[in-house]
Amino acid sequence: MEIKECSALMFRSNCPSRELLDQIADKWSMMILAVLAEGPLRFNAIRRGLEGITQKALTQTLRKLERNGIVARHVIATSPVAVEYEITDLGRSLVGPFKALYLWTRDNYDAVEKARAEFDARMEERV
């Protein structure tokens, strides 16, 4: 893949970091990693920790994270066979940045809500 003008200011369609950002910073990936941060979990335990995620969305996201080396899937030889997921060392390197992003959302929620209310009020004035 040829990389052209790939920077934090210009995300060309062939920029590998753009593709990877799309895959690790999507709706569910960050939350799945947060749920797995304390240790390995089975599929349904992950699902219980993520209210609103569908089985299909969880399966697709776990596959994507596994393909990218962020999450490892382990088959447990029990009857019936079970599967658990855990964060890899590569995935653990994301925990700090994701935690910082989460803390930002918590620390700035009131300011964001104020900005939303101000925006909504301006939009209502235009109607």
Image: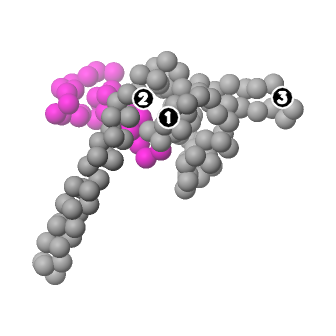
Q: Count up the numbered dots.
A: 3
Instruction: Provide the residue span drawn in magenta.
Output: 1-29
Question: Residue 102: which numbered mark, if any?
Answer: none
Instruction: State the image coordinates of residue 40 (x, y, percent, origin top left).
Output: 62, 29
Q: Give the residue pinned by disc 1.
A: 33
Dot 1 amino acid type: Leu
Residue 103 to residue 96: above or below: below
Front one among 47 and 61: 47
Instruction: State the image coordinates of residue 108 (x, y, percent, origin top left).
Output: 26, 49
Instruction: State the image coordinates of residue 114 (x, y, percent, origin top left).
Output: 21, 62
Residue 27 to residue 62: above or below: below
For numbered disc 2, what is the local secondary structure? Answer: helix
Q: Residue furthest right?
A: 79
Camera-nearest label, 2 or 3: 2
Q: Which residue lies furthest to the bottom in this view?
A: 127
Q: Give the residue pinned by disc 2.
A: 95
Question: Residue 78: which numbered mark, if any?
Answer: 3
| Alpha carbon distance from label 2 to label 3 | 30 Å
